[in-house]
Image: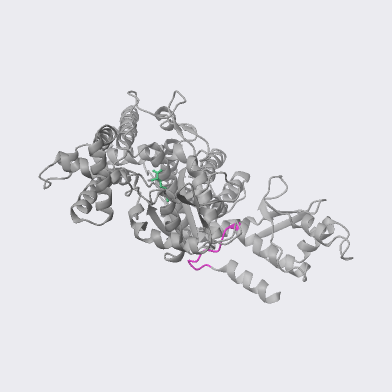
Amino acid sequence: TSTQVGKISDDLSSTSGDAVGSVKQQLSKIFKASLQATFPNEQDVEPLVSVSTAKFGDYQCNNAMGMWSKIKGKSTEFSNPNSIGQALVRNLPASEIIESTSVAKAGFINIILSNAWIAKHIERMLLNGIETWAPIIPVKRAVVDFSSPNIAKEMHVGHLRSTIIGDTLARMLEFSNVEVLRRNHVGDWGTQFGMLIEYLFEMSPNGEDAGQQAIGDLQDFYKASKKKFDEDASFKEKAQKAVVRLQGGELKYRNAWKEICEISRREFAQVYQRLGVHLEEKGESFYNPYIPDTIRELDDKGLVVESEGARVIFIEGQQIPLIVVKSDGGYNYASTDLTAIRYRLREEKAEWIIYVTDVGQQNHFDMVFSAARRASWLPESVGSSFPKASHVGFGLVLGADGKRFRTRSSEVVRLVDLLDEAKNRCRKELEQRLENHGKLGEWTGQELEKTAEAVGYGAVKYADLKNNRLTNYTFSFDQMLNDKGNTAVYLLYAHARICSIIRKSNRDLEELKKGGGISLSHADERILGLHLVRFAEVVEEACLNLLPNVLCEYLYNLSETFTRFYTSCQVIGSAEESSRLLLCEATAVVMRQCFELLGIEPVYKI
Ligand code: ARG
């Protein structure tokens, strides 16, 4: 084990730009070495290191109990869990991270981190960049399938949630050095296109000026064509023939289809542009040519059976089977998703495929994943290992009345209008605030607009992300734009205030960073320092559990921890000024990285 220990200390002293892993990961390595030294016959025991819930330490290691039940009666070396804890401590390799340990009666080990190490870890981050605090996620490439609205239908608040949550998950994975394929699985295929195309031809009989003019508002166009489809039998027949001609690749029909998709795409782009979200479209139509081959493979593997004229896959534990070929021979949502998951695993070599939709689609994805396991596209075991597929479900967006979020005229809310309203409200409040402080004159119109956008869009995102995604959340401008409490407005302003403390010091931060010298002698300095170095493991947890709210909670607590530090520790003009300014800077850097991961633009002055 001596080489292993040597390797560990090499990793820890690394000051290169490479990520060293979270504190938890680093402690786990040390305890892994100790476990292996203590139990040479049990080399595969995973170290159980977690943040301390008790006040006896910063972290704890909880392996003693489990090891005791494993070896009890088989070994004479240990008499109880406590003696195992003691041995684990004795066998710990030397490490700068740990200041001291104590073993509780039941055997778990309390770990206190070294102040000097915390300080050094922060100093190194300030010099080498926050990227060195990226967690290590054991995946090379992931697909995040998110947003995914449907062509010609409205992009609703559900798609907004998917866009916001999916973007954050993608950002967290990208920060953790995972290559992310950001997939917009738009609904651009299916029988509804026959009716849309046929209606388009009727609206512009000469066929040449198809497009925006003839269509006008795409949602209205959709409704009108649907009405005609339901009421006019000969139109319905024409529409059904149009689908066949489209699928047969007839040029006139393909062009009309493309035109309709393009108009939708331009509308979606307006939302993405405001939110600063990037997606790569691979819509349902992309997978269409690969469906027959996919079904054939599933059939060859004996998974597909006939049922009431349709071809289906029965899934264990599910009453209703997954229909993969409809009774009319056509394909559906499930055939496309089966084809897509196979493509993503085989062609795109993704090790983690993440689908962000409302919880209502949970069952659909459970069935698709089960089928993929039965086809051996995914490994048999469902657990924490990769490759795997995960469904990230979320609850409804509610209005003040507790019902589904709608406009006053009970129409579906246009997302562009919603985002613009957030921005406009922010701009008004910002102008008022500056006016009150006699500072409005110092701001250009462009600065006002940029800040209002950052705060307004940031507020909408944060209000969504801070909740556990599975719960429904109530959309309220008044709440999300409040500058007190757990809101983006409060957090963005808190960050701007830290920046202004640093500016007012008139010190050269780059010089300070080179000098280092952070000390954590005051209790509140230490609490802040400890919270800062926990950043990587929080991102790791948020990533692996697909829970952005974990990061929001960390960010909010960071802001509170900073306030406590700033209240009890004088910064400017104190003997500890340099060290404390570095703590301010580190807090600002970590806050900015949180904002970045949440897709929120930081604000530097208010
Ligand atoms: N277009 C679907 C909807 O609006 C969401 C698609 C989600 N992704 C997928 N691969 N099925 O509900």
Residue 342 placement (x, y as % from top left): 45, 61
Left or right: 434 as drawn, with respect to 482 = left
The count of marks equals 0
Residue 387 at what x, y percent from top left? 53, 61
- Using the rendered image of the protein, determine whether residue 394 is visible from the camera's viewpoint: yes
Asked if residue 581 lies in the magenta stretch, the reply is no
Front position in the image: 143 or 343:
343
On screen, residue 312 versus residue 50, left or right, reads left
Query: In the image, is 20 to the left or to the right of 56?
Result: left
> What span is colored magenta in the figure?
15-23
Foreground residue among 217 and 299: 299
Q: Magenta-highlighted stretch: main secondary structure? A: loop
Residue drawn 24% across and 49% down?
Answer: 257
Question: From the viewer's perspective, is 78 left or right of 224?
Answer: right
Instruction: Say which quarter of the image contains residue 412.
Output: top left
Q: Quadrant of the N terminus?
A: bottom right
Name which residue lies at 44% across and 40% down: 462
Does the rendering let one see residue 512? no
Q: Give whichever of 216, 554 is nearer the camera.
A: 216
Q: Residue 595's x, y, as percent?
A: 43, 47
Look at the picture and state if 15 lies above or below 245.
below
Question: Which residue is the extreme one toward the bottom?
Answer: 3
